[in-house]
Amino acid sequence: EVQLVQSGAEVKKPGESLKISCKGSGYSFTSNWIGWVRQMPGKGLEWMGIIYPGDSETRYSPSLQGQVTISADKSISTTYLQWSSLKASDTAIYYCARLAYHYWYFDLWGRGTLVSVSS
Amino acid sequence: EIVLTQSPGTLSLSPGERATLSCRASQSVSSNYLAWYQQKPGQAPRLLIYGASSRATGIPGRFSGSGSGTDFTLTISRLEPEDFAVYYCQQYGSLVTFGGGTKVEIK
């Protein structure tokens, strides 16, 4: 089955670090870009950035660059979204999604990882 | 950055009615690289339309997309109970941006 499996929900305190994951299966993982999309509580979708697992080339949303780090380990078909110091405003559901081959629309989505940041 | 504005914010309709959702871009979307997604509560988004008018695999024929340049439309010809959800447009002609969404609710 073609799918993206995301890591489980996280509860963290402000200032803590965090790395969440997204593992692809059922397709050639290095052939498609993977993106991360944020959805804050009760809000819309916000593109954060994308990575090409084949060579780890990365592009970030101008509004979010520097706030997170996107990485990949193609040997285990997994991409990561990482924070060095969480803020309460990072509370959201984070989706990973596969970009279509040669085009940047999202044709396969993970189920999302809920990140809650509170003191 | 291309800004996408969706209207209306909320659309109140009855099953069987026609839904027309608008997505307007702040500048022309290259090659009509515009997609539409459906999101139901507690679920991940689902791709409906790409390339402004091409239906994704498995999407029913009552969903159609149209438009070009800066003005795009998603039409649901006859609303089924499972179509009540939030719909987002996304452009991929210049990096990626999403619109703010339109909620289609039961009247």
Image: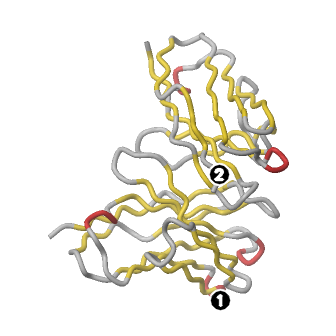
- Determine contact: label 1, label 2, CB under 8 Å: no
Q: Viewer-proximal residue, B84 or B94?
A: B94
Residue A72: quadrant of the picture: bottom right
Q: CA distance from mark 1 to mark 2?
A: 35 Å
Q: Count numbered badges in the picture.
A: 2
Residue placed farthest to the left in the image?
A119
Residue A49: quadrant of the picture: bottom right
- Judged left or right of residue A49, residue B9 is left
The residue at 69%/68% (across/down) is A26
Q: Reply above or below: A27 against B66.
A: below
- Judged left or right of residue A20, residue A56 is right
The residue at 34%/50% (across/down) is A41
Task: Give residue A107's position: percent from left, percent from top.
Answer: 69, 54
Q: Which colour scheme appears in the figure?
A: secondary structure
Task: Give residue B96's position: percent from left, percent from top.
Answer: 65, 58
Disc 1 residue type? Ser
- Element marked by disc 1: helix
Residue located beneath label 1 in the image = A75
Residue placed farthest to the right in the image?
B31
The residue at 63%/57% (across/down) is B1
The quadrant in which the C terminus of chain A is found is bottom left
| Same chain, labels 1 and 2 | no
- Judged left or right of residue B58, residue B18 is left
Mark 1 neighbour density, 10 Å: few (under 14) some (14–19) many (20 or more)? few
Task: Give residue A16's position: percent from left, percent from top.
Answer: 26, 82
Residue B34: quadrant of the picture: top right
Residue located beneath label 2 in the image = B2
Chain for mark 2? B
Disc 2 residue type? Ile
- Residue A32 is tagged as none
- Element marked by disc 2: loop
